[in-house]
Amino acid sequence: MDKIIVGIDVSKDRLDVAVRPSGEVFVVERNAAGLEELVERLRPLGPHLVALEATGGFETVAAAALAAADLPVVNPAQVRAFAKAIGQRAKTDPIDARVIAHFAEATGPEPRPLPDEATRLLADLVARRRQIIDMIGAERQREKRAPARLKKSIVRLVKALEKELTSVEGDIDDAVRGSPAWRETEDLLASVPGVGPTIARTLIAELPELGTLDRKQIAALAGLAPHTRQSGQWKGRSFIGGGRTTVRTALFMGAMVGKKYNPVLRAFFERLVAAGKPKMVALIAVARKLLTILNAILRDRQPWRQPART
């Protein structure tokens, strides 16, 4: 019996739904009544997967409603790239829903639990902190070029942003340190030289799968899994991409610190450079190794141990 796969294209006001292999398509409104109708129509089908494309947050409520009904929800990445690969470039909503269903059927992503409300709030706070830091950086760059009469305005704005940054960081600290589970996880992550509170909290908020997947799966989620360009007998350089950009950025920060102060990562980096690897390639490898170490630490719930010197 064929597995039933459902693709849902989410927009502000509606959900376009496509069912494979039957080819059925239908539309419901993106409101309480529409979500109730969606669950009632999908539950008797017993779908193997229900896939939604990320659409700037509009999919969150729909995904939560489906998960609450014990339907196996996935949120596949790079659906647009898959659509182009199969020559499907039209942007009508029903076609997109069918493409999402086709993608899920072809790739078979594993359903994973959705982040709970507390994790989503922490992710929002971490994202807000990042936004404020970017705004402060942009204003300080403007200050360098601004005429004297505008600099006072910029200074006032930077002070206000710094005050808001302190407030947001306090909210993040309260959230993490106020949760026994998160506090333990942060302490485990921060036990690794090169990982401070900012990196640890980014991983808690934006990579909740850490410690539950194998090293290849977690590297793919972070966008650190190497891909090789290859055609026939020609083989190009490997590259990384996709995944969660903010997580990858945090791990690069950890890699840059770790290659100086973490003995394992420093030796690994130096060995790669001595073998002729470009420094950026070596740094990517260090970030991937750091992620592997952190994944094992959370899996085993054991803190970092300094390797014995031989």
Image (tube, rainbow, N blue to C red):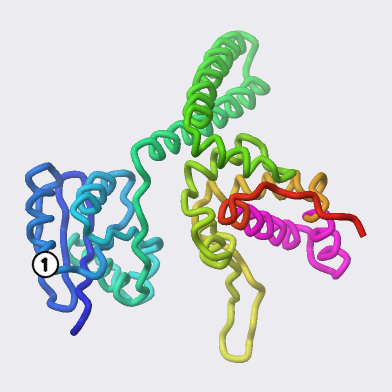
- Residue at 29% of width from left, 75% of height from top? 105
- Secondary structure at badge 1 equals strand
Quarter of the rendering occupied by the C terminus:
bottom right
Principal SS element in the magenta part?
Answer: helix
Indicate left or right for 15 with 135 as reference. left
Indicate left or right for 308 with 56 as reference. right
Residue 10 vertical position relative to residue 158 in the rendered view, above or below: below
Q: Nearer the viewer, residue 175 or 55?
A: 175
Residue furthest out toward the bottom: 233
- Residue at 49% of width from left, 49% of height from top? 207
Count of numbered circles in the view = 1
* Horizontal and vertical percent position of residue 220: 52, 63
- Residue at 57% of width from left, 18% of height from top? 162
Local packing at callout 1 (Cα closer than 10 Å; few below 14, some 14-19, many 20+) is some
Q: Nearer the viewer, residue 3 or 232?
A: 3
* Horizontal and vertical percent position of residue 78: 40, 63
* Horizontal and vertical percent position of residue 201: 55, 38
Q: Kindly indicate the quadrant of the structure image that contains residue 228.
A: bottom right
What residue did someone put label 1 on?
A: 25
Residue 266 inside the magenta-drawn segment: yes
- Residue at 27% of width from left, 66% of height from top? 100
Indicate left or right for 281 with 175 as reference. right
Residue 306 vertical position relative to residue 173 in the rendered view, above or below: below
Residue 278 inside the magenta-drawn segment: yes
Residue 177 vertical position relative to residue 252 in the rendered view, above or below: above
Query: Tag 1: residue type?
Result: Val
Q: Nearer the viewer, residue 147 or 153?
A: 153
Q: Nearer the viewer, residue 28 or 64?
A: 64
* Horizontal and vertical percent position of residue 98: 21, 69
Residue span colored magenta: 265-294
Quarter of the rendering occupied by the N terminus:
bottom left
